Amino acid sequence: MQKKIPVIFDTDPGIDDSVALAMALFSEELDVKLITTVAGNVGIDNVTSNTLKLLEFFGRTTPVARGAASPLKRKLEDASWVHGSFGLGEYDFPEPRTQVIEKNAVEAIRDILKNSEEKISIIATGPLTNIAAFILTYPKLKNKIDKLIFMGGSLDGVGNKTPYAEFNIGVDPEAADIIFKSGLELVMCPMEMGHTAYFNKRDIARIKVTNYVGAMFEVLFRTYKDNHVKNGAATHDSCTASYLIEPKIFKTKRAYVTVEIIDTVKTGIVVCDFSKKSRDIYNMSVCTKINVVKFKKLFFTIMGNID
């Protein structure tokens, strides 16, 4: 049996984050060592409570560490209009009985990396605040990170937070700037992937009858208000998790990627330079295409792993 990939999952549930978290937890390829929460889709209290609710619903006991309550230098502007005021649409989860661990996200990431005999990958489905704070606090430990796969940015400079900025990057562009300059092995999964491989109405009907988790997802999807997908549900964060599980689903290109952080109308816009003249300063791989059929096959295979 192939050895599982050790993972830290940094997240802000959020509807699509919930689906991505299930994919990571129930995949046969990943071993989620730690979940860290970050303010984004809704505030830190709600995203942390949502994470604990989801874990109990999934029947998992992965440790959860509470992370940043606000961006590095800005006031939080959440996306409750997309995910509902509490972040998980209209599904009525019981209040969680479990609690977060005592250490905050940065210290918990430090412990996991320091004590691991192998490098660990990070999946980030929310703003990059926790990861940037970790890099600033413990720069010598970044060599214990195998790769960071993050959901963020867009290929064409069109946003969903502002006309230019994708939400996760736009919430904390300073954190993204730190990550882009960190020297880490980075993989960017832009929002076009989730808009291309979205779940249509037929997919959602199939998801609903898969099992108890699928029935819950269907309720979440009813109130998921992504402006780019009118007749279904976008899969942004699920695509990001899928990259680490089965990277061959995607086509990627090396690029030099920057983020605008000056307080102008284009703050948070991500610019991807794929030109050969920038080859010497490429800083990440960017997902440019996704095989929709293979992505959905992977998703339903993982759903079939749920007992």
Image (cartoon, rainbow, N blue to C red):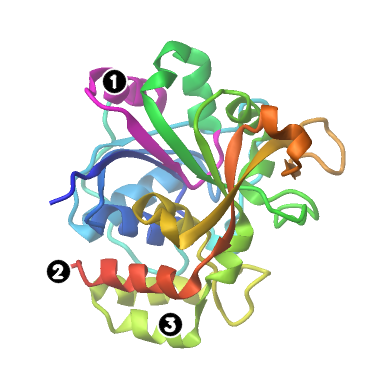
| Residue indicated by mark 2 | 307
Q: Position of residue 206 (x, y in %)?
A: 35, 85
Q: Position of residue 267 (x, y in %)?
A: 79, 39
* Pointer 3 or 1: first along the chain: 1
Amino acid at circle 2: Asp
Residue 246 painted magenta: no
The local crowd at label 1, few if under 14, some if 14 to 19, many if 20 or more residues have their Cα within 10 Å, is few
- Please tell me in which quadrant of the rendered image residue 288 appears: bottom right
> Quick one: quadrant of the C terminus?
bottom left
Magenta residues, start to end: 103-128
Question: Residue most toward the front?
Answer: 276
Q: Residue 290, relative to residue 168: is it above or below?
A: below
| Residue indicated by mark 1 | 111
Q: Is residue 199 visible?
A: yes
Residue 109 painted magenta: yes
Amino acid at circle 3: Asp
**Left or right: residue 275 compared with residue 4:** right
**Left or right: residue 232 compared with residue 57:** right
Q: CA distance from mark 1 to mark 2?
A: 32 Å
- Give me the residue at 47% from left, 14% from top: 139
The local crowd at label 2, few if under 14, some if 14 to 19, many if 20 or more residues have their Cα within 10 Å, is few
* Pointer 3 or 2: first along the chain: 3
**Left or right: residue 282 compared with residue 69:** right
Q: Residue 163, relative to residue 197: is it above or below?
A: above
Q: Position of residue 11 (x, y in %)?
A: 44, 45
Q: Secondary structure at mark 2?
A: loop
Q: Nearer the viewer, residue 245 or 162?
A: 245
Q: Position of residue 276 (x, y in %)?
A: 74, 39
Q: Are marks 1 and 2 in contact (CB under 8 Å)?
A: no
| Residue indicated by mark 3 | 203
